[in-house]
Image (cartoon, rainbow, N blue to C red):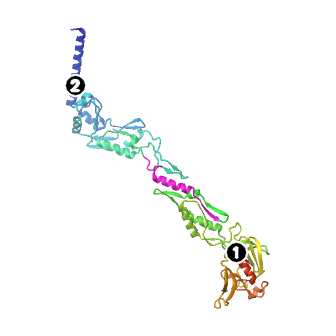
Amino acid sequence: MSKGTKVALIIAAISLVAGFVAIFVVANNFFMGKFPVQTTIIGGTEVSDKNISDALVQMNAAEGLKIIVNKDGVECTVPVSGSVTRLYDREQVEDAKSQISFFDYLFHTKVEIPLQPKDVTIDEKKLRNSIETTIPSPKYKTSDAYFDSDWNLIAEVQGDDINYKQFMKKVTDDIRSGNELNYKAEDFYFHPAVKAEDENMKDIQEKIQQYKKMSITFEFGKRKEVITPEKICSNLKIKKGKVKLKTGWTKDYVRRLARKYNTMGATRTFQTTKDGEKKITGGTMGWWMNEEKTLENLKKALKKRKSTTMKPVYRAIGATHGKDNDIGKSYVEVSIQRQHVWVYIKGELKLETDCVTGVPNKERMTHPGCHHIVAKQRDRYLGTMAVQGYHTHVDYFMPFNGGEGLHDAPWRGSFGGQIYKSGGSHGCVNLPPAMAAKIYDLAFVGMPVIVYD
C-alpha cells in the first residue's frame, strides 16, 4: 500500500468519525430537548441552542424580543422586552420544539415558529415611546389636496409619517399572537384622503375657474359698479365636498348701491332760465331702486357662474344718470312766480309760454319739485262734479304729480301774470291750447317737469 493511499484512508476515517459525531450531536439535540444552534425563533424570541427550560424562561421574560422596522432602506431595531411580559407554559414550548424536523437540525435551516402566549401584559405607552424614539422622524408629512387662499388647487403629498395608531394595533396584536415582529414602515404610512385627481376635486376646480373668470357689472348710465372675480371668490367655501358661494354679502351690496345712486326725494341744484340756480327739493321724479328684485336678479346671475352686465330694477326712475343730477337736458321748466313754462330738448330751448298754475293754498297749489310726465293722454275729462266739483274736457293731458299735469285750458282768455293767485287751477299747469299741442308733441313719458316758486 502506498503512502498516499494510507493518508487518504486516514482522512476518510477521520471524516467519517467527524460525521458520526456531528450526527450524534444533532440527534442528541433533536431527541434530548435542545433547540437547533442556528437561528431559531419561537414566539418572537430567539432560543437558538437553548434547552426547553431556558427557552421558557427567556420567552416569558420577552428577552431578546424586538421589533424590526425597515424605513427607507434602513433597518431599525426596537427592543421591547422592557415593555412586554408574556406567559408561556412548558407544554407550549415542547409542542413548538416538536414541530422542528431532524433535517432542520441537520441542515441548519432557520426556524421561526409563531406561538401565542397564554397571557400578555403590554405597557403600550412605554412601547410606543420606544418605537417613536427609534424610528427616524418623517421627512415629509402626508397632506390632502386642497385649495389655497387664492383658490389654486394644491396637490396632495404622500409623506413618510407613520400612522402610529394603526401600527401599534398591528404590533400589539402580533405580540399577543406570538407572531414575527418584522415590518415595512411604508405599510403604515398615512395616505391622502383627498387627491387632486379625484373627480370631485376636478369638479370643484372647474367651478372655481368659472367663478375666477366671472364678474357682474351694474350699469348706472355711463357709470358702472363691478363685482370683481376677487370679490366673488372671497365668498366661496367648500362644504361637504362641494363648492358653495356665500350670498349673505349681496343684500348689503345692493343696499349700498341704492344709497349711492337713489335720487328720489333728493335736493337738486337746478339752473333756471331766468332766476339762476335754485335748490329743488322733493317731487315724483328720481331713481328709486327696487332692492328686493335687484337682489333676486343678482343671486340668479351669480348662480350661472358667467360674466354679465345688468341694470338694477327700479320702483321709480330719473331721466338720466348724472354725477350732479338726474334731470338731463330735456325737460319742462315751470316757474310759479313767473307763471311761465319753458321746454328744453337736448339742451335747446324749443318753446316757452305763459301759464296758469294752481291757487297757492294747501288744497289747490301746484307742488314744487322734480316731477316727471307719467302719461300722455288725448281727449279726456278731468275731475268729477261729485269729488272735485268740476268735470272739464281737455285735448291734451300730461300728468306729472298725481292729479297735477300739463294741459290745454281753452276756457281761459289769458295766461300769466297774477291770475293764479285768485283764479288759478286746482294744481294743474294750464296752457294756451296751441302751446299745449306743441308741448304734447315734444313731451315724452318720463320727461322731467321741474316746478319751483
Residue that numbered label 2 is attached to: 23
Asked if 12 appears above or below 379 in the picture, the reply is: above
Secondary-structure class at tag 2: helix
The residue lying toward the viewer, choosing from 357 and 116, is: 357
Residue 147 image position (x, y, % from top left) = 51, 52
Q: Magenta segment range?
A: 191-219
The N terminus: image quadrant = top left
Q: Is residue 356 visible?
A: no
As measured in the structure, the alpha-carbon distance from the residue carrying label 2 to the one carrying label 1 is 124 Å
Asked if 245 appears above or below 393 in the picture, the reply is: above
Splitting the image into 4 quarters, where does residue 49 fall?
A: top left
Residue 19 image position (x, y, % from top left) = 23, 22
Say which residue appears at 75% left-offset and 82% top-offset. Answer: 434
Q: Which mark is residue 448?
A: 1
Name the residue furthest top: 2
**Would residue 112 be found to the left or right of residue 339 on screen?**
left
Asked if 258 appears above or below 132 in the picture, the reply is: below
Q: Which numbered disc, 2 or 1, marks the residue closer to the eye?
A: 1
Q: Is residue 331 visible?
A: yes
Splitting the image into 4 quarters, where does residue 73 fall?
A: top left
The residue lying toward the viewer, choosing from 178 and 326, is: 326
Q: Amino acid at mark 1?
A: Pro
Q: Amino acid at mark 2?
A: Ile
The residue lying toward the viewer, choosing from 450 and 83, is: 450
Q: Is residue 153 magenta?
A: no
